[in-house]
Image: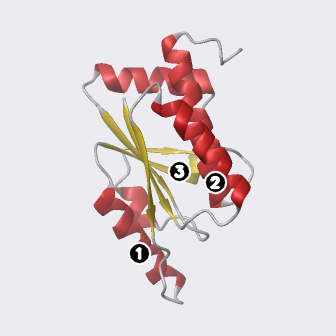
Amino acid sequence: MRYRILAVGQLKRGFYAEGCSFYLDRLQRMAPAEVIEIKDGKDRDSDKRNAAESNSLLQQADGKVVVLDERGKSFGSEELAAIVSDWETEGVSRVSLLIGGANGHGPQLREHAGAIWRLSDLTLPHELARLVLLEQLYRIETIRSGHPYHRA
């Protein structure tokens, strides 16, 4: 599977950047993966800002679109590995995973999603969501390859 992580905003704190780089490097050894940062919307009106960010995310998305959103469904790591394997069996070769900005995603983006995932019942800052997502994608690929990283 090829992964494209689309994230609104840049990582502002060094420890997030270090963690994301660590897991991206590990993931790229197992599957093609890239992170594309989308500029934050500048409009003061949150609906207009969300619409602009959503449009930018969708323009960069390719393949199956997965929106990360608090309203999505949560899965265990093994379940996600099975979902990704099923998608591959169905002919999906690229997944774009969309992380919103500080105000999340607007409803128009969720309507275009092929899937909506929730990373946690907790509210996560979007920088931490990126780190958690990269770790989970790495974990998914280790499960799929039989690597001992994941211990059930």
Which corner quadrant of the image does residue 64 belong to?
top left
The correct choice, above or below, for 61 with respect to 41 in the image is: above
> Where in the figure is residue 62, as x and y percent of width and height?
29, 48
Label 3 is placed on what type of residue? Leu
Residue identifier under label 1: 51
Q: Residue at x 69, y 60 (%)?
A: 125
Assign a secondary structure to mark 1. Answer: helix
| Mark 2–mark 1 distance (CA, rounded to whole Å) | 27 Å
Q: Nearer the viewer, residue 61 or 25?
A: 25
Question: Residue visible at 53% across and 28% down?
Answer: 80
Q: Secondary structure at mark 2?
A: helix
Residue 129, image x, y percentages: 63, 51
- Dot 2 or dot 1: first in sequence order is 2
The C terminus - image quarter: top right
- Mark closer to the chain start, 1 or 3: 1
The residue to which callout 3 is attached is 68
The three-letter code of the residue at mark 1 reads Ala
Q: Which residue is mark 2?
A: 17
